[in-house]
Image: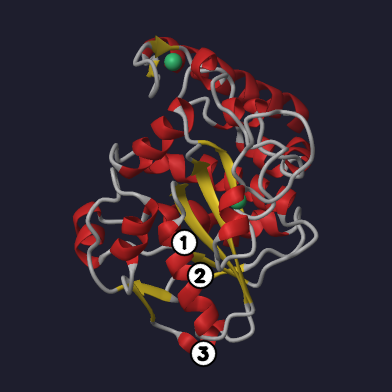
Amino acid sequence: MNPDVSGATHRGIVRIWNAFKGALFPLTCLMCGQFYLQRPGLSKSFQRGAVFNELIKKPPSVFLFSRLMTSYVCPVCAQQFTPIESPCCTCCGIMFKSREGVDHLCGECLNSKQFFGMARAVGVYDQALMAVIHGLKYGEKVGLATPLSILLLSAYQYFWHDRPMDLVVPVPLYGRRLRKRGFNQVYLAIRHWEDQKWQGALPALPMVAREVLRRKRSTPPQTGLGRRERMQNMKDAFELSASHAIIKKRILLVDDVYTTGATVRECARILLKEGAEAVDILTLARAM
Ligand SMILES: [Zn+2]
Ligand SMILES: [Zn+2]
């Protein structure tokens, strides 16, 4: 048979099967809990193809989020995603309430030492990002690691295109919490950065270094604590497990949510004290 015809037939069958499967097994939206039918989403060809290569060079957007989350969030709820936009703080990345003007330092960054150089996030920590982060963290939806990884990559490409980093370090979990959950959600979301199929499309990505930091002790939940108490709570919670690896390296520290920054600030302090050249922060979400 002509290979073009057999390819077209195959694609036709796949399309019919997907439509059939979608009608038989509607998906449940992680945000509103309603059933919805799957739309064609981020297919493998999209990930490898020109569309993906173009998208990944743009900042995270509602379009990218809804396209990536098509198996997890219904098209209506996906519109609630809020990307981080200027004007924001040049250091900690908080978005200013006024939507006019240029990026500048916020009051907190003017008055206190943050240790890291720049912190940026994929989006605002609202219902949309909360639903998908919790889906990965507590809902055992491990498949979310790939779309979250692409969102982080999109943010990295956008915010760091002119200042590449050497290493990507996930903020570690404490041993007991790690054993209970079985995985570190942040590591899960960035380990795809080493994926070969992305390497050709993008400039050299920093190396993922999982074993650089270790959490020495469990820290009580930060909820309800003020800035000073959070810093106290985090004091000496981390240690370096591979000190030689970070000397004179530019490190991108990755975490799921930036709330007051106490966790990443403490990690950055230790990394710089032990010889890192610079530490920047990338999180999935930024609490505002
Ligand atoms: Zn929904
Ligand atoms: Zn700031």
Of the residues shown, which amino acid type is indicated by label 3?
His
Q: How far apart are marks 2 and 3 (CA)?
A: 16 Å
Provide residue 237's location: percent of width, then percent of height.
Answer: 31, 70
Residue 206 higher or lower than 227, as above or below:
below
Q: Give 122 or 178, whichever is nearer the viewer.
A: 122
- Residue carrying label 2: 268
Question: Nearer the viewer's eye, disc 2 or disc 3?
Answer: 2
Please give the name of the residue rendered at 40% of the width and 21% of the height, measured from the top-left corner. Answer: 31
Give amino acid for label 1. Val
Q: How far apart are marks 3 and 1 (CA)?
A: 20 Å
Disc 3, SS: helix
**Which quarter of the picture shows residue 100?**
top right
Locate the N terminus by quadrant: top right
Q: Do the residues labelled 2 and 1 touch (CB within 8 Å)?
A: yes
Residue at x 56%, y 52% (from the top left corner): 108
Give the image location of residue 9, x and y in percent: 65, 21
Question: From the Cβ of disc 1, is ligand 2 less than 8 Å away?
Answer: no
The image shows residue 192 at horizontal and vertical percentages of 54, 55
Residue closest to the eye, 51 or 233: 233
**Residue 91 locus on image (x, y percent):** 65, 55
Residue 208 sits above or below residue 212 on the image: above
- Is 243 above or below relative to 225? below
In-front residue for pair 51/119: 119
Q: Earlier in the sequence, mark 3 or mark 1?
A: 3
Query: Which residue was labeled with disc 1?
Result: 264
Q: In the rendered structure, which disc, 2 or 3, sits on the residue that comes first in sequence?
A: 3
- Secondary element under disc 1, as helix, strand or loop, is helix
- Give the residue pinned by disc 3: 244
**Relative to 183, 280 lies left or right:** right
